[in-house]
Amino acid sequence: MNIKVYEDKNSLGRAAAGLAATSLRNAIENHGNARIIAATGVSQFEFLDALTSTPGIDWSRVEMFHLDEYIGLPVSHPASFRKYLLERLINKTGIKKYHFLEGDGDVPAIVCRVGGELKSAPIDTAFLGIGENGHLAFNDPPADFLTEEPYLIVDLDEACRRQQVGESWFADLSEVPRRAITMSVRQILKVKEIVAVVPDARKAQAVKSCFEGDISPLAPASILRTHPNTAVFLDKYSAALLSPETRARAEKH
């Protein structure tokens, strides 16, 4: 795992977008298309802004998979991840082939259908974040590190739900759905390359726990340390609690 530390989330976002763009171009050149997984949330704003304005990517050859989604929210809801991806990625780039998790539909059937599409061929790149509780996608602690199912139906813990309120997606905790669909941890680890975008001071404790503590279901994103091709992009605020030894090993920009 390669940790990179930047001065702020704008420079972090540009750098992560540069790596992601290279990965997409290489996949398209090598086998004609790029299959990607895209995360959502406030932490991805600068990264997606930079990526969607990067020239030289043939987005018509990109196929996108949904990482996670709330159960019960319509696509029109401000917190819908489908709405987010449409507005911040798909409509900006013209991606034609994408697979949504329609959390307000027949959830078991959707999990089966999209999971089958996901497993049909390798995924080139995943764009991920890390939650304030260390979650990876909506795999809250203690996460299931063993299941081979591509998507899971999960209960969201209170820390995760409070983060959604803190990011202003919901007015209060009572509005946040209690259940969600999420890509499983083992499915995420099957991706060829992972670009993890993790800015802001509110992520600092999770960053320390996941990258300096034990690799454990109690710190779900710690599992990224076992992946052979992961780059973690931090700013000085999310990296603030890392030990001097870890900071010395990180790439500073």
Image (tube, rainbow, N blue to C red):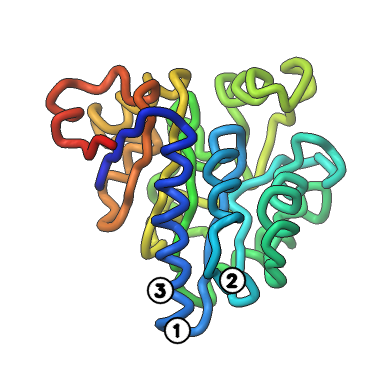
Q: Amino acid at mark 3?
A: Asn
The answer to whether residue 230 shows anywhere in this view is: yes
- Of the numbered discs in the image, which one, if any, rests on residue 31? 1
Who's the residue at 55% across and 39% down the image? 46
Whichever of callouts 3 and 1 sits on the residue coming sooner in the sequence is 3
The amino acid at mark 2 is Val
Quarter of the picture containing the C terminus is top left
Q: Is residue 47 left or right of residue 113?
A: left
SS of the residue under disc 3: helix
User: Is 144 displayed left or right of 167 in the figure?
Assistant: left
In the image, what residue occupies the spot 75% across and 15% down? 172
Which residue appears farthest toward the bottom when viewing the image? 31
Q: Residues within 10 Å of mark 1 (few under 14, many from 20)?
A: few
Residue 98: image quadrant is bottom right
How many numbered badges does the structure rendering display?
3
Residue 71, compared with residue 25, is above or below; it is above
Q: Position of residue 48 (x, y in %)?
A: 58, 47
Instruction: Report, in whole angstroms, how far the alpha carbon at label 3 lies from the one at label 1.
Output: 9 Å
Mark whose residue sits in front, 3 or 1:
3
Q: Which residue is mark 2?
A: 62
Q: Residue 2: horizontal and vertical position, in percent?
A: 25, 46
Circle 3 is placed at which residue position?
26
Residue 216 or 16: which is nearer the viewer? 16
Q: Secondary structure at mark 2?
A: strand
Question: Which circle's residue, 1 or 2, is located before the other in the chain?
Answer: 1
Q: Amino acid at mark 1?
A: His
Which mark sits nearer the N-terminus, 2 or 3? Answer: 3
Across and down, in percent, residue 108 comes to: 72, 56
- Spatial CA distance of label 2 from label 3 is 12 Å
Above or below residue 32? Residue 152 is above
C-beta proximity under 8 Å, tags 3 and 1: no
- Depth check, front residue: 147 or 190: 190
